[in-house]
Amino acid sequence: MLRIKSERTIVATGEYTQEVRYYVTSLDNTRPEKIASAIRQHWSIGNNLHWQLDVTFREDYSKKVKNAAGNFSVATKMALTTLKNEKTTKGSMNLKRLKAGWDENYLSQLLQDNNF
């Protein structure tokens, strides 16, 4: 069992927060730096996915109620995976999303290539 205390200061506001998290691990005699790195990497995967969803679909700015939030989350993750798998168009995920909205042939090809 691990106990990690993290501290954060938001530069723009000066707001300071502390948080304690607990982890279950089977790692014995592992350097604390290595464990901290593994934890940071674990959180970075989720943060990177959230960042991509927010940039591509403006997820943080949309208001959903009841089941809509879960349904939208599934749909945007499927769409993001579809756009990531598409290799014929150069550019950002946002550019590919816009192109799919503007070009029905491109959208049709995306859906066919991903077995929708």
Image (cartoon, rainbow, N blue to C red):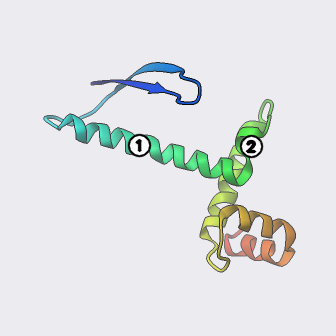
**Mark in front: 1 vs 2:** 1
Query: Which percent across, then down, holds residue 110?
Result: 73, 72
Q: Amino acid at mark 1?
A: His
Q: Is residue 6 above or below residue 72?
A: above
Quarter of the C terminus within the rendering:
bottom right
Locate residue 116 relative to residue 33 in the image: left or right. Answer: right
Instruction: Tell me the quarter of the picture where residue 27 sits.
Output: top left
Q: Amino acid at mark 2?
A: Asn
Locate residue 63 relative to residue 56 in the image: left or right. Answer: right
Locate residue 12 relative to residue 23 in the image: left or right. Answer: right
Quarter of the N terminus within the rendering:
top left
Residue at (62% x, 61% y) in the render? 81
Disc on res. 42: 1
Residue at (68% x, 77% y) in the render? 89
Query: Which percent across, then down, holds residue 5?
Result: 35, 22
Instruction: Tell me the quarter of the picture where residue 56 sits.
Output: bottom right
Q: Residues within 10 Å of mark 2 (few under 14, many from 20)?
A: few
- Residue with the mark numbered 2: 71
